[in-house]
């Protein structure tokens, strides 16, 4: 079993979004989906992956742009450190 990480470059800031999964499972975690949800969805499809959750390292605009559409499309939870919540609320 190996850990795989695919980088998907998204948005006008060319931010790195990541898809992380083990080779023996279709379950994946999305990390920092910055924008261009269609590119992330395409990468998931290319690898026959099913996202289980979204994890963000922080809540800056260039890291959260695709969170809502991906969360809604796949009905998955979104995780972010509680100290970053104030950024989402502003």
Image (cartoon, helix red, strand yellow):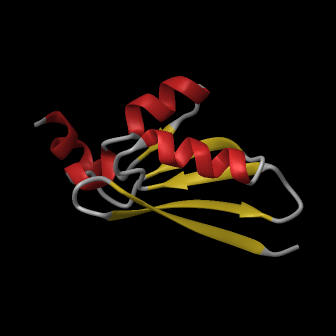
Residue 20 as seen in the image, left or right of residue 13: right
Residue 86 as seen in the image, left or right of residue 5: left
The image shows residue 3, relative to residue 59, as above or below, that is: below
Image coordinates for residue 10, horizontal then vertical, percent: 37, 56
Say which of 80 and 61 sits in front: 61
Image coordinates for residue 61, horizontal then vertical, percent: 21, 49
Q: How many marks?
A: 0
Residue 90 as seen in the image, left or right of residue 4: left
Residue 48 as seen in the image, left or right of residue 14: right
Residue, far bottom: 2
Residue sitting at x 40%, y 39%: 67
Residue sitting at x 55%, y 25%: 73
Image coordinates for residue 1, horizontal then vertical, percent: 88, 73
Residue, far left: 90
Residue sitting at x 26%, y 51%: 59
Residue sitting at x 76%, y 48%: 27
Q: Quadrant of residue 22?
A: bottom right
The image shows residue 9, relative to residue 86, as above or below, that is: below
| The C terminus - image quarter | top left
Image coordinates for residue 35, horizontal then vertical, percent: 35, 46
């Amino acid at each position: 079993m190996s850990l795989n990480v695919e980088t998907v470059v998204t948005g006008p800031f060319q931010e790195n979004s990541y898809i992380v999964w083990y080779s023996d499972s279709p379950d994946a975690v999305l990390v920092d989906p910055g924008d261009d949800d269609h590119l992330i969805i395409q990468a998931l499809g290319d690898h026959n992956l099913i996202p289980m959750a979204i994890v963000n390292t922080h809540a800056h605009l260039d890291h959260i742009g695709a969170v809502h559409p991906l969360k809604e499309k796949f009905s998955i939870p979104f995780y972010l450190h509680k100290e970053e919540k104030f950024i989402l609320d502003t």
